[in-house]
């Protein structure tokens, strides 16, 4: 009873993460991040397969990022609880990390995770090569543009962007976001090699 | 066809319903331009996702250091409940006591604040300062003097004399009518927000310093720091610094250049400040010219303000 005063249900968490409100989003993500039972499960899994506590931390952070991405982009599907989903993502992330490091084959357990409940983070994210190219391009945008585009990606309304960034009104955030997006698109298009790498 | 292009983002973000997805995918088979645009938008949004994930990663690093187990919150709640019950119990007991049970003198004393507590720690220097400043009420306040800090402060290099001289001239004493009008129309940037943005750019340390100085109204120091910077954002704040110190002639060429930079995110702000510089200089011809351009741009942030100011300048 008391615990329920301080924790949010899955549906509340999902609404909060997708709300486009910084405070709510942070609260929800923080609850999941600080959930000890998830941590313990992930930690046991990672250590049983040759990982350290640092590996657990890395896996957990990357999986939180995947979870956040899935929820905001309607890729969760409500087929399991958030906890089960996050643990599944953690296992996949750990598997991907190990495969990259060529440390082990996790074929035994990973076959069991080939279900709708689990999401392979590699499917969702840019690969390392793309990430480094895109990161360089993003670096060419100013700090302000980066902030605007982050808020835009988080589905903030134009008014919320104006309030958060300190613009005069909704129209100015609309103009600024459009300008930043155009600048970035031009940067993308100007890199012919990049576009080939990105299979455009 | 345009409708499909407008649906690209919703398609990527999974916001279309089943029939819309079916239509959209059918159109994708027919329209290679739509396919091309879809790929570009997908890459674009995936790139922005990197900004979100970087930001979340930074936050999680701070959560990790001060995370508290949920159980402690439960204990806090339990403790708070017990405290509430205790307060309620005391309150009820207090109410039920006979009226004759008036508070004793001793009790009254405990409620009253203690007067003139005796200083114990290093009160001599404070007494001296207080008497110098003629602040009798400060006599008995004990102050811990940080001799180390005091020493460090003394060792700080003195500010450049030229800057100090400039600072004294920064705040205009008497403003002309046109300057008054310009300053009233200019809203100083929200420097806290600007600082938050500036720290996201990795090469923006100079800009960060400049914004802190601008926030502290040290426009002349900002001019020294930003003088060599070619970055549009830095140039804008340099012009704000010139504007604040009434050096409109120096601000105008910078703002003219920024106003012609179509890629500059704060182009509209630069145009508005340019108009205000002309207004401040009482250059009505150029002021009206710029204000008219702003007013006639239907999507300009300062469209309405420009219209209102145009009327005042005209009069």
Image (cartoon, coloured by chain):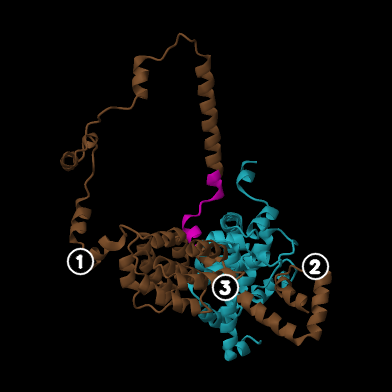
Q: Is residue A19 above or below residue B29?
A: above
The chain holding disc 1 is: B
Left or right: residue B135 versus residue B13 is: left
In the image, the segment drawn in magenta is B61-73
Question: Can you identify the residue that label 3 sits on?
Answer: B50
Can residue B52 be seen here? The reply is no
Quadrant of the image occupied by residue A163: bottom right
Q: Looking at the image, is mark 3 or mark 2 earlier in the sequence? A: 2
Question: Which color was chain A given?
Answer: cyan
Local crowd size for mark 2, using a 10 Å CA cut-off: few (<14), some (14–19), many (≥20): few
Label 2: element kind: loop
Give the percent coordinates (x, y) of residue B268.
52, 70
Indicate the position of residue A135 as horizontal and vertical percent values: 53, 78
Q: Position of residue B67 (x, y in %)?
A: 50, 54
Q: Nearer the viewer, residue B79 or B279?
A: B279
Rounded to the nearest angstrom, the CA distance separating label 1 from label 3 is: 47 Å
Write down the residue under mark 1. Answer: B161
The residue at which mark 2 appears reads as B17
What residue is rendered at 35% in x and 63% in y? B213
In the displayed structure image, the side of residue B194 where residue B113 appears, left or right: left
Q: Check the picture and name the quadrant holding the N terminus of chain A.
A: top right
Q: Is B24 placed left or right of B201 in the picture?
A: right
């Amino acid at each position: 009873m008391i615990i329920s005063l301080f924790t949010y249900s899955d549906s509340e968490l999902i609404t909060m993460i997708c709300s486009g409100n910084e405070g709510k989003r942070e609260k929800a993500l923080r609850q999941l991040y600080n959930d000890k039972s998830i941590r313990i499960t992930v930690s046991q899994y990672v250590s049983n397969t040759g990982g350290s506590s640092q590996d657990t931390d890395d896996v957990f952070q990357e999986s939180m990022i995947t979870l956040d991405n899935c929820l905001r982009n309607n890729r969760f599907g409500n087929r399991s609880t958030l906890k089960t989903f996050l643990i599944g993502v953690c296992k996949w992330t750990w598997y991907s990390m190990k495969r990259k490091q060529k440390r082990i084959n996790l074929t035994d357990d990973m076959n069991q995770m080939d279900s709708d409940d689990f999401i392979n983070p590699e499917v969702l994210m840019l690969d390392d090569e793309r990430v480094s190219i895109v990161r360089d391009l993003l670096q060419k945008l100013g700090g302000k543009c980066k902030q605007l585009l982050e808020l835009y990606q988080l589905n903030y309304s134009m008014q919320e962007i104006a309030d958060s960034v300190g613009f005069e009104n909704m129209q100015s955030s609309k103009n600024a976001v459009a300008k930043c997006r155009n600048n970035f698109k031009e940067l993308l298009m100007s890199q012919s090699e990049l576009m080939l790498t990105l299979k455009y | 066809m345009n409708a499909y292009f407008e649906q690209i983002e919703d398609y990527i973000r999974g916001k279309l319903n089943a029939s819309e997805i079916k239509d959209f995918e059918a159109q994708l088979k027919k329209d290679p331009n739509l396919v091309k645009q879809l790929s570009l938008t997908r890459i674009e949004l995936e790139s922005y996702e990197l900004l979100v994930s970087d930001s979340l990663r930074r936050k999680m690093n701070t959560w990790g250091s001060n995370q508290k187990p949920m159980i402690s919150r439960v204990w806090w709640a339990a403790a708070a409940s017990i405290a509430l019950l205790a307060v309620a119990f005391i309150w009820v007991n207090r109410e039920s006591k006979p009226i004759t049970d008036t508070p004793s003198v001793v009790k009254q004393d405990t409620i009253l604040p203690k007067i003139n507590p005796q200083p114990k720690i290093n009160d001599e220097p404070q007494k001296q300062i207080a008497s110098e400043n003629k602040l009798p009420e400060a006599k008995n306040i004990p102050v811990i003097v940080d001799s180390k800090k005091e020493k460090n402060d003394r060792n700080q290099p003195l500010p450049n004399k030229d800057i100090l001289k400039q600072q004294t001239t920064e705040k205009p004493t008497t403003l002309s009518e046109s300057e008054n009008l310009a300053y009233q129309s200019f809203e100083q940037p929200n420097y806290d927000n600007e600082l938050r943005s500036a720290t996201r750019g990795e090469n923006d340390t100079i800009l960060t310093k400049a914004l802190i100085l601008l926030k502290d109204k040290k426009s002349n120091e900002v001019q020294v720091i930003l003088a060599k910077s070619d970055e549009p954002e830095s140039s804008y704040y340099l012009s704000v610094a010139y504007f604040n110190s009434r050096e409109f002639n120096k601000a105008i060429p910078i703002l003219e250049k920024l106003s012609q930079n179509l890629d500059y995110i704060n182009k509209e702000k630069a145009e508005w400040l340019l108009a205000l510089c002309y207004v401040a200089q009482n250059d009505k011809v150029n002021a009206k010219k710029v204000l008219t351009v702003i007013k006639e741009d239907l999507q300009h942030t300062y469209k309405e303000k420009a219209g209102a100011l145009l009327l005042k300048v005209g009069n």
